[in-house]
Image: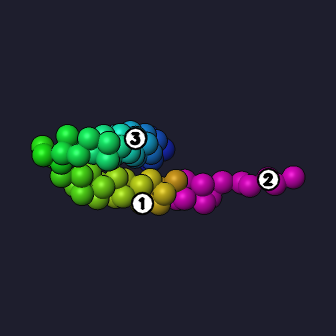
Amino acid sequence: MKPFLAKLINDLFAIQFVVFVAYFGFEFLFEGIVSNYFDLNILLVVTIVFGVVSAILDHDLNNGDDKDFS
Protein backbone atom coordinates (compact mmCIF):
# COMPACT_ATOMS: atom_id res chain seq x y z
CA MET A 1 0.00 0.00 0.00
CA LYS A 2 2.82 2.41 0.81
CA PRO A 3 4.45 2.21 -2.65
CA PHE A 4 1.05 2.87 -4.23
CA LEU A 5 0.47 5.87 -1.95
CA ALA A 6 3.95 7.24 -2.64
CA LYS A 7 3.42 6.91 -6.41
CA LEU A 8 -0.03 8.52 -6.16
CA ILE A 9 1.28 11.48 -4.15
CA ASN A 10 4.24 11.85 -6.50
CA ASP A 11 1.96 11.92 -9.55
CA LEU A 12 -0.44 14.36 -7.86
CA PHE A 13 2.49 16.64 -7.06
CA ALA A 14 3.67 16.58 -10.68
CA ILE A 15 0.19 17.37 -11.98
CA GLN A 16 -0.36 20.06 -9.36
CA PHE A 17 2.99 21.69 -10.16
CA VAL A 18 2.28 21.80 -13.90
CA VAL A 19 -1.17 23.27 -13.27
CA PHE A 20 0.28 25.91 -10.94
CA VAL A 21 2.97 26.92 -13.43
CA ALA A 22 0.40 27.10 -16.25
CA TYR A 23 -2.02 29.21 -14.19
CA PHE A 24 0.82 31.44 -13.04
CA GLY A 25 1.94 31.91 -16.64
CA PHE A 26 -1.59 32.76 -17.76
CA GLU A 27 -1.90 35.21 -14.89
CA PHE A 28 1.44 36.78 -15.76
CA LEU A 29 0.58 37.20 -19.42
CA PHE A 30 -3.09 38.15 -19.03
CA GLU A 31 -3.63 39.83 -15.68
CA GLY A 32 -6.88 38.82 -14.02
CA ILE A 33 -7.63 35.79 -16.18
CA VAL A 34 -7.11 33.42 -13.25
CA SER A 35 -7.09 35.62 -10.16
CA ASN A 36 -10.59 36.97 -10.81
CA TYR A 37 -11.97 33.47 -10.32
CA PHE A 38 -9.42 31.56 -8.23
CA ASP A 39 -6.79 32.38 -5.61
CA LEU A 40 -3.38 31.09 -6.73
CA ASN A 41 -2.13 31.09 -3.13
CA ILE A 42 -4.41 28.14 -2.36
CA LEU A 43 -2.95 26.22 -5.29
CA LEU A 44 0.57 27.14 -4.17
CA VAL A 45 -0.01 25.82 -0.64
CA VAL A 46 -1.47 22.57 -1.96
CA THR A 47 1.49 22.17 -4.34
CA ILE A 48 3.99 22.71 -1.53
CA VAL A 49 2.19 20.22 0.73
CA PHE A 50 2.14 17.56 -2.01
CA GLY A 51 5.83 18.21 -2.68
CA VAL A 52 6.85 17.84 0.96
CA VAL A 53 4.76 14.68 1.44
CA SER A 54 6.12 13.26 -1.81
CA ALA A 55 9.71 13.89 -0.69
CA ILE A 56 9.08 12.32 2.73
CA LEU A 57 7.40 9.21 1.29
CA ASP A 58 10.07 8.82 -1.39
CA HIS A 59 12.80 9.08 1.25
CA ASP A 60 11.07 6.51 3.46
CA LEU A 61 10.74 4.04 0.58
CA ASN A 62 14.37 4.41 -0.52
CA ASN A 63 15.81 4.46 3.00
CA GLY A 64 15.83 0.68 3.50
CA ASP A 65 16.88 -0.38 -0.01
CA ASP A 66 20.20 -1.98 -0.77
CA LYS A 67 22.35 0.61 -2.41
CA ASP A 68 24.96 -0.63 -4.81
CA PHE A 69 27.11 2.24 -6.03
CA SER A 70 29.68 0.13 -7.85
Which residues make up the magenta segment? Answer: 59-70
In primary-sequence order, the first of circles 1 and 2 is 1
Q: Residue type at mark 2?
A: Asp
When asked about the image quadrant of residue 53, the answer is: bottom left
* Residue annotated with mark 2: 68
- Residue type marked 3: Val
Q: Nearer the viewer, residue 39 or 32?
A: 32
Q: CA distance from mark 1 to mark 3?
A: 16 Å
Observer-nearest residue: 68 or 20? 20
The three-letter amino acid code for the residue at tag 1 is Val
Asked whether the viewer can see residue 50, the reply is yes
Residue of label 1: 52
Neighbour class for label 1 at 10 Å: few (<14), some, many (≥20)?
some
Closer to the eye: label 1 or 3 = 3
Q: Residue, x 20% and y 40% (percent of image)?
A: 33
Question: Mark 2 and 3 residues: CB-CB less than 8 Å, in contact?
Answer: no
Label 3 sits on a secondary structure element that is helix
| Local secondary structure at mark 2 | loop
Within the magenta stretch, is there residue 16?
A: no
The residue singled out by tag 3 in the image is 18
Q: Provide the secondary structure element on which disc 1 rests.
A: helix
- Dot 3 crowding, Cα within 10 Å, few <14, some 14–19, many 20+: few
Residue with the most extreme right position = 70
